[in-house]
Amino acid sequence: MDYKKPIPALDNWNRPFWAAAREGALKMQGCKSCGHLFYPPGPVCPCCFSDVLEWRTLSGRGTVESWVVFHQAYYKGFSDELPYNVAMVRLEEGAYLFTNLVGIPNDKIRRGLPVEVIFEKATEEITIPKFRPAEPAEA
Ligand code: ZN
């Protein structure tokens, strides 16, 4: 596959996140001592430093907390997509994730917009979680 953007280097800490994404699930590390949910993954909880951690499957729903729109390609692989957004999504479970919003023009993005995860396959190994405006709840 000819994917031109930077892709993450897998290590023992982040591998479960990317394995889950490949299967269409959003997972994050959670602390079994204090309950904190966090990303990026690591050996200890950034809140209480406990190493008693577990991987939790998340709903994939959240809201836009903040975003920026890039008008300059810092990596050549992004030049065809200018201007593109990078957003911080506040997940329903409380953690934040940096991502891209798809399915919405950049000038329609707003804080508090309900979004839901989708998964875009980049390479055989890497599938990237992105977010789109959430479907309105069934009446
Ligand atoms: Zn903790």
Image (cartoon, rainbow, N blue to C red):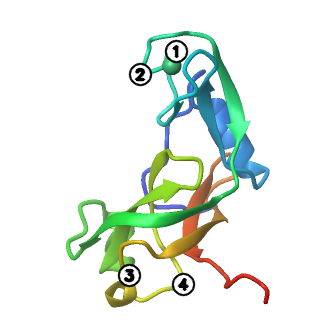
Within 8 Å of ligand 1, the CB of disc 2? yes
Of residue 92 and residue 70, the one placed in the foreground of this image is 92
The kind of secondary structure element at disc 2 is loop
Marks 2/3: CA–CA distance: 31 Å
Quarter holding the C terminus?
A: bottom right
Which residue has dot 2 on it?
A: 47
The kind of secondary structure element at disc 1 is loop
Q: Earlier in the sequence, mark 2 or mark 3?
A: 2
Marks 4/1: CA–CA distance: 35 Å
Which residue has dot 1 on it?
A: 43
Going by the picture, which residue comes out furthest to the left?
Answer: 72
Which residue has dot 4 on it?
A: 103
Kindly report which numbered mark, 2 or 3, lies closer to the viewer in this rendering: 2
Quarter holding the N terminus?
A: bottom right
Residue at image x 41%, y 22%?
A: 46
Marks 3/4: CA–CA distance: 10 Å
